[in-house]
Image: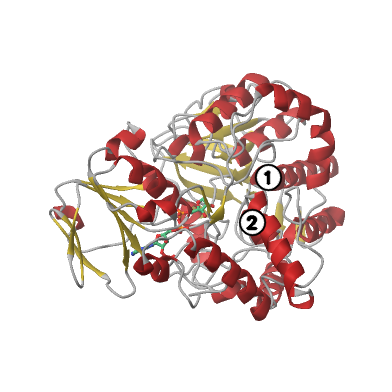
Amino acid sequence: MISTNGHPKRPDGGSSNEILDVLIVGAGFSGLYLLHELRRSGFSVQVVEAGSGLGGVWHRNRYPGVRVDSDYPVYAFSAPELWENWSWTERFPGGKELRGYFAHLDRIWDLARDVRFNTRISAARFDNASHEWRIGTVDGDILRARFLALGAGFASKPYIPRIPGMEDFKGLCIHSTAWPQGGVDVVKDKKVIVIGTGATGVQIVQEAAKVATSLTVMQRTPDLAIPMQQQRYTTEQQTRDKSWYSEYYARIRKNSCAFDFDFIPENAIDVDPAERKKTFERLWNAGGFPFWIGNYQDVLKNEQSNRMAYDFWRERVRERLRKPKMREILAPTEPLHPFGTKRVSLEQDYFDVFNFDHVDVVNLRESPITHIAPNGVATKDKLYAADIIALATGFDSWTGGLTSIDIRGPEGRSIGEHWATGVQTYLGLTSSGFPNMFIMYGPQTPGVFTNGPTIIELQGDWITTLLKSLREHGHTRIEATPQAETDWSALIESLAAQTLLPRADSWYIGANIPGKPRKYLVYPNGQIEYMHHCNQALDSFRGFRVQ
Ligand code: NA7
C-alpha cells in the first residue's frame, strides 16, 4: 500500500478531497497533449512532473549538441493555433529552441496552471472498491484519480553501467542527462572521454571535438549514422510555407512512420543496380531519416537488400575518414548488425572530427574497459587520461521509468512483477491487471519508429475518445483482458520475426540492460496498421472488460 502520513493533502489547483478524473505523470509532449485534450472534453486533470519545467526530455537534457533528429515542421503538434505564430531557426532544432517551443505551447494552451512541478510519483495503487487510483508522491502526499495516464517517456531512467573504480575518479563523470550548467564550456580545454556512441554520444562528440584538448571516444558498436543535412531557416520562408501546413499535417498521418515520406514500395533487390544507387544517393542527400525508414521496403527485411544499404553507407563514410584505423573501427568491412536495426542517428560532422589529431576512438570489443582510475579510463591495453568522462550510455528504455514507480493493481501485484519475464501490454496503451491505467508513447507501440508528436496526438485522441465513451456509458472501470494482452505480444513477435529488427542487440529488444528480458518492444508495422488495431478496440471496448 502507499504509505500515507495523514489525510490527502491539497495538490496545487485542487481541493483536499478532490478526486481527479485523470492524473497524468510527466509534462513532456505526451502528458501535455493529453492534458489539453482532456480539459477540452470537460475532464478534471492534473499533470505531475518531477522536473522544474515543461518539456520532459527536452527540459532535462542539457548536454552539448542536444538536438532532435526529426525535422521542421514535423516535430511539433499540428494544431493551427500553435504553428500560426511559431517559427523555427533550424531544420533540426536544438534543445534550447525546443524548450522555447514548450514555453510557446504554454502561452497558447495555458498548460502550466495544471502542472504540479518538482513532484515525483513514488507509488500508485488501484482501489477496487472505489475504482480509483491513490497516487503517492515522494513527499508523502496522496493524490486521487479515477484514471492514471503515464507519460513518463521511454528515456526517463538513465542507464549507468557499473564500472569498477568509478567512485575513485577525481574529475567529473556524468551521464548525459545530468550535464551541469555551462553546456559545451564544461569540456572546453579539458581531456574528455565519451563512452557510448548512440544518438547522444554522436551529438556530444561533434561538439566536444571542437573545444576539448583531447577527445577519446569509447565505442562498443559503431553508430551507422547518416547525414542530417542541417539547414538554417528564415521566418519569412516559414511564413510562406504555412500555406501548406494544414495539408502537410493531415498527410503525414497517412504515412506509416508519420513523416512526410514512406518506405519506397519496391524491393532494393529487384531494381537495377544503377537505379538503386541513384535512389540511395537521393535519400542520402535529402538528409534525415529517409535513408533509414524511407528506403526500399525490403531493406529492413531482406538480408541482401540490407547489405546493399550498408555497403553504400560504409563507402560514403569511409570517403570522409583519412586514417585507415578509423575506417575499420567506425565503418567496418563487415557490419556488426544489419543496417537500421539499431536506432540510426543523424550526424553533421561526426565522422569528420575523427580526422583531428586530438580525437581518438577505442574499439571496446577489442580492448574492453577494465576499470576507471582516478585520472582516466583503463582498458585492457592502455590508460586513457581524462578530466571529464561523459557517459552517453543510454536508458533502461520504457520499462525503467515505469517500474521505478511502485504501481500496483487491485490484487497488489506490481507492474515490475507483471513484466518480470518481459513487457506485456494490450496495444502498448494498457496492461492487464492495471485497470484505468494508460501508458503513452510506451513499449509495444510503433512510437520510436514514428514521428513522436504525431503518434502522441493519435494516442492522446484515442485515450480521450475512450474516456468519453466510458463516461457516456456510465462505466467507471476498464481493464485489458489477459487474452488481449497475450495476443498483442504474439502479434508483435510474429511481425518482428518477419524483419531483421530483432537481430541487433538494441534497446528496442531490451538488450542494452544486463538481465533485462529480451523481447521485441516496438510494434514494427507502422502507425497506420497500429491505429487500425487501436480504433477497432474502441468499437464496443474490444479486448477490454468494462464495468
Ligand atoms: P543509446 O542509443 O542506448 O546508446 C548508448 C550507447 O552506449 C551505445 O553506443 C552503447 O553501446 C553504449 N554503451 C552502453 N553501455 C556501455 C558500456 N557498459 N560500455 C560501453 N558502452 C556502452 O542511448 P542514447 O542516449 O544515445 O540514445 C537514446 C535515444 O534517445 C535515442 O535513440 C533517441 O531516440 C533519443 P552498444 O550499442 O550497446 O554496444
Earlier in the chain: of badge 1 and badge 2, it is 2
**Residue 54: horizontal and vertical position, in percent?**
53, 31
Residue lying at 74% horizontally and 77% vertically, measured from the top left: 269
Quarter of the image where one finds residue 485: bottom right
Q: Nearer the viewer, residue 303 or 472?
A: 303
In this rendering, which labeled residue sits more in front, label 1 or label 2? 2
Q: From the image, tell me which residue sits under label 2.
A: 284
Q: Is residue 440 left or right of residue 328?
A: right
Quarter of the image where one finds residue 52: top left
**Residue 249: horizontal and vertical position, in percent?**
79, 39
Disc number placed over residue 456 in the picture, else none: 1
Quarter of the image where one finds residue 266: bottom right
Residue lying at 41% horizontally and 47% vertically, measured from the top left: 206
Judged from the image, the secondary structure of the residue bearing numbered disc 2 is helix
**Residue 360: horizontal and vertical position, in percent?**
30, 58
Q: Is mark 2 within 8 Å of ligand 1?
A: no
Residue lying at 72% horizontally and 54% vertically, measured from the top left: 257
**In the displayed structure, would residue 305 be above or below residue 144?**
below
Q: Nearer the viewer, residue 105 or 150?
A: 105
Q: Quadrant of ligand 1?
A: bottom left
Residue lying at 43% horizontally and 52% vertically, measured from the top left: 352
Type of residue at label 1?
A: Ile
Q: Is residue 390 left or right of residue 464?
A: left
Few, some or many residues within 10 Å of mark 2 (<14, 14–19, 20+): many
Q: Is residue 445 visible?
A: no
Cα separation between marks 1 and 2: 28 Å
Disc number placed over residue 533 in the picture, else none: none
Q: Is residue 222 left or right of residue 436?
A: left
